[in-house]
Amino acid sequence: MPAGAVAAHLNRKARWRPAEIVFWLAIPALIFALPSRALLINEILLAGLFALSLDLVLGYAGIVSLGQAAFFGVGAYGAGILANAGIGEPILGLVIASLIAGVLGLVTAPLLLRGSDLTRLMVTLGISLLLGEVANANPWATGGTDGLSIAVKPVLGLFPIDFNGQRNAALYSLVVLFILFALARRLVQSPFGLSVHALKENRLRSGALGISAAARFVTIYAIAATYAGAAGALVAQTTGLVSLDVFDFHRSADVLLMLIIGGVGYLYGGLIGAAFFIALRDGVSSATPEYWEFWIGLPLVVLVLVGRERIGAFFARAVATGGASLIPGAPP
Amino acid sequence: MLTILFDGVAYGMLLFVLACGLSVTLGLMNFVNLAHGAFAMAGGYAASALMTRYGVPFLVTLPAAFALSAALGVVLERTLYRRLYRASHLDQVLFTIGLVFMAMPIANYFLGDQPQPVRVPAFLSGRYEFLGIGVGVYRLFIIAVCGAIAGGLQAFLIGTRFGAQLRAAVDDQRVASGLGIDVDRLFAITFALGCGLAGLGGALAADVVGGVDPSFPIKFMVSFLIVVAIGGSNGILGALLGALLLGVLDVAGKYYVPSIGAFIIYAVMVVTLIIRPQGLFSRGGGR
Amino acid sequence: MSAPALETRGLARRFGGLVATDEVSLRLEEGARHALIGPNGAGKTTLVNLLTGTLRPSAGQVLLEGVDVTGLASHARVRRGLARTFQINQLFANLTPAESLCLAVGERLGYGRRFLPAAGRDPEVVSEVEDLIARFSLGDVMDLKTRTLAYGKQRLLEIALALACRPRVLLLDEPAAGVPEDERADILAALAALPADVTIMLIEHDMDLVFSFARRISVLVAGRVLMEGEPKEVAADPRVREVYLGEGKDA
């Protein structure tokens, strides 16, 4: 065993691969090249961030959650209320709203420690629906069924991101997404991230190595909640409107589908899946505006019946000739 | 106030019939079927179509709704569901969500997006005052029918051989099949039964909720899941008590504090699951 | 006299009407090489689970270096120096041996809370991992996913993981079980090379291994300690012979 082999092996995923660099450079290029599509790109980026937050919960902590929308909604309404209350600087509003969502995650995580898969499903769903009702019952704060319109000041006082500054909005979202992504990337490769992965792989053995499942779990759930809150806050700030559907079951279901489409557990899945899902949705719904859901449901059913791993493996092999190993931590 | 209790009990009984199939499916097959509401919707649509297009009397549409939904359940179980019994819960959730995403547009396409009514016949409408309680005749009918079903199910479970086999299989599947019980057939029949009951419930519920429309599966999915979560998935009694609790709370909540909407239900569910993850009325530990 | 490394007092565990562990009192001094033997179903693994905290006792206490740990969760006991291997491998199927050991060492050093630096950057961790890999002959498989390893190698990794915790007390649950003949030597060598100041309790069915390794043996039958003594005494005791008659094992 040559010297340094162990270290090299342990650190093999740390450096950014060429494919990743290309990926992240391509996005701003796309924004500048297609300014008329900035709104759509922004939507994809933020859906991707939301899906990334779910990846942390599902792909790394192993929880099937149907209530990630709870944190998304809190972030959205939080940013909206803050902006209308006088905190117009978007970055400040973003940070505060995300932290509020994170605190909610911190508080609700212990509820998920006991119980079965179904219990967790129900509790996560229940919390998001609960918050929806709270939002509905307090129209003085949330605008109720009319929704909340927000006006934010230009980012850093320089870059307006309202409907006149859609390109800026997309770039703003991209910068935030990238920063959060990079942090998440380091997180999953850190000792903490390794321990969370280990807990998902073999809980018993992890305990036998001295890892306390509860503390790790609560931490990653809270981090994921912060990310979801950030996504919600950005949606509020860049689209100028928050409505009650942010807490809907549909939101949680859609983001789950996006993540599944793109692949769970390697961080890029949420982004890829968001792009696919939204492209599919826009394409299909312009063809059949009333029945587009059917064309989402059918592939999903087929996907599950055929076997997600098999399809995932198929794509992995297909891409392998083009360099699947370039994606850090790609599923086997 | 007793009227509210009465209405709540009626709603609860309805929820019981709708949700007990889900409870048994979960308890027996450990299968998370989020598409359960689609079978209820099918039953509701069947009843509506039979009445409005073919003039079938209301009372006849009820068993017809049961039969249709049960048949649909058999077909889907044999072809699709059974492949996923051993799948992860995530896969089951995704699969059944996919089914719901398919079922709703199908309903929309063939039956339109307007709520389809199931008109209650004259002899079942109206209200009477009885000892200070406002008794709606239809609600009384619902309580009677659902109560009979609950009683019948319990008798079936306790009194028949099939029922005994079912209880054994819920308790421990491997042991049951080791005893020679055909677990496969058990699943199929039980699943069909649960779907049939859902369909019957859908037909009964149509008038109470203002008609059957394509969003039925999603609107009520949460209610079903709450019944199962609160009541536990160990049997009929748990589902019944859970449903009654939910029904009364929902009706009372909406009456006394209308702005709160469904908040109470969700809050009760979350609190219940925190304190007793296996449900309020179940016997054993969580799964 | 300093406290024994591992001690139980009247430890008992009941499952309904079944008594799995019945008033077991053990004392292991520091550096002990203690074996626990008994027929199948005697409750050996149950006892290990009670010691590690995976199971709560119905009665009695567990003391680690004189401290009562009966109320502590398993991961807390690990932090106090108690490690175990599992009878059936409990490994991280999709991690490589190097990664698994890196995790174990990192956790021991308290790095589990570190969010930002990559796991493999710390030279102290890396050198310990390299050392463990060398000692357990895992060099040629250290970068392969654990699930692809041969059973014998997996078993070695199982022991290596426990040692990565630098335990004061180590519980080995049938380390040689199921290992093919040609891979056994590695296991036996690894056991022989365990540090002298670590207190070891070994559960085994393989009597050759037991008698070559242990300095004291406890015999567990139906949850109770039948007798305890040096290997010669145990081998000669008629009650032990009777218990093992029909087992087909050489005693």
Image (cartoon, coloured by chain):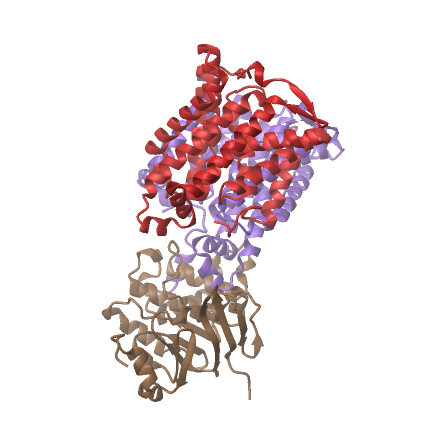
Chain colours: A purple, B red, C brown
Res B191 visible? yes
Residue at 33% over, 46% down: B181
**What x and y, as percent, mark residue C32?**
43, 82
Viewer-side residue, A152 vs C161? C161
Res A291 visible? no
Viewer-side residue, C230 vs A19? C230
When the figure is inspected, residue A5 is found, relative to residue B155, above or below; the finding is below
**What x and y, as percent, mark residue C104?**
46, 64
Residue at 28% over, 79% down: C208
Viewer-side residue, C158 vs A250? A250
Say which quarter of the image contains residue C180: bottom left
Residue at 68% over, 30% down: B4
Q: Is residue B267 left or right of residue A28?
A: right
Residue at 43% over, 28% down: A297
When the figure is inspected, residue A53 is found, relative to residue B100, above or below; the finding is below
Q: Is residue B2 left or right of residue C69?
A: right
